[in-house]
Image (cartoon, rainbow, N blue to C red):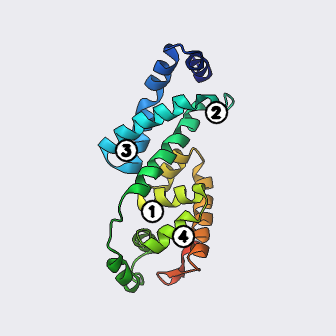
Amino acid sequence: MQDAEAVALTLKGDPRGPELLLTRYQMDVYNVSLRMLRNPADAEDVTQDVFLRAFSRLHQYRPNQPFGAWLHGITRNRCLDVIRSRRPMVELGVIEHASAAAATQDVEAAAITELTSERVRTALDRLTDRERSLLVLRYWEDLPTEAVARCLAISEGATRVALLRARRSLAAALGSQEIGGREFGDEV
């Protein structure tokens, strides 16, 4: 049975539809959540929440798009909500001293350090959801580019270009702050 048929059954109230979709996608949603959150309990909670949200919003699904990609979008957004709700990992005082160490660190290490500061969080909030998702997945969650591409259901090349643009947007939002002797937005 195809996903579109399972969605149609679900919308008609037939319990075979949600059972099929749950069986088919539960582990994918869990694995994406675990990769993003790095906490099995949080990943289980998010997986359950994603399916509740998906089934309650099934009328918004367009049958001409892959169901898995639609579901992964819901998963990504829910994981980002959880990530945003977490407390900062580093004290702000440590970040003040990080700028002195940035000259010896590579750009990505400096970006990870900087992403924990309140100033950068404020700048991230001014970015689009896609830009914020890219930066959080790549630098905060430290996922490799190919994993970010899979999470966002786009090609790896498109992910690299989108990351470059997202870094430039973040640099602009931060007032073109320099990190590690190079402008943050110039590093691919």
The residue wearing badge 4 is 123
Residue 63 image position (x, y, % from top left): 66, 27
Residue 186 image position (x, y, % from top left): 59, 74
Q: Residue 158 carries which label?
A: none
Q: How crowded is mark 1: few (under 14 residues within 10 Å), some or many (20 or more)?
A: some
The residue wearing badge 2 is 60
The residue wearing badge 3 is 34
Residue 72 image position (x, y, % from top left): 52, 40
Q: Which of marks 1 and 4 is nearer the N terminus?
A: 4
Quadrant including the C terminus: bottom right
Q: Do the residues labelled 1 and 4 touch (CB within 8 Å)?
A: no
Residue at 63% of width from left, 28% of height from top? 59
Residue at 47% of width from left, 56% of height from top? 137
Q: Earlier in the sequence, mark 2 or mark 1?
A: 2
Residue sitting farthest toward the right: 64
Q: Which of marks 3 and 1 is nearer the N terminus?
A: 3
Q: Would residue 47 appear left or right of 8 to someone viewing this image?
A: left
- Under mark 4, the amino acid is Ala
Q: What element carries label 4?
A: helix
Q: How crowded is mark 4: few (under 14 residues within 10 Å), some or many (20 or more)?
A: some
The residue wearing badge 1 is 139
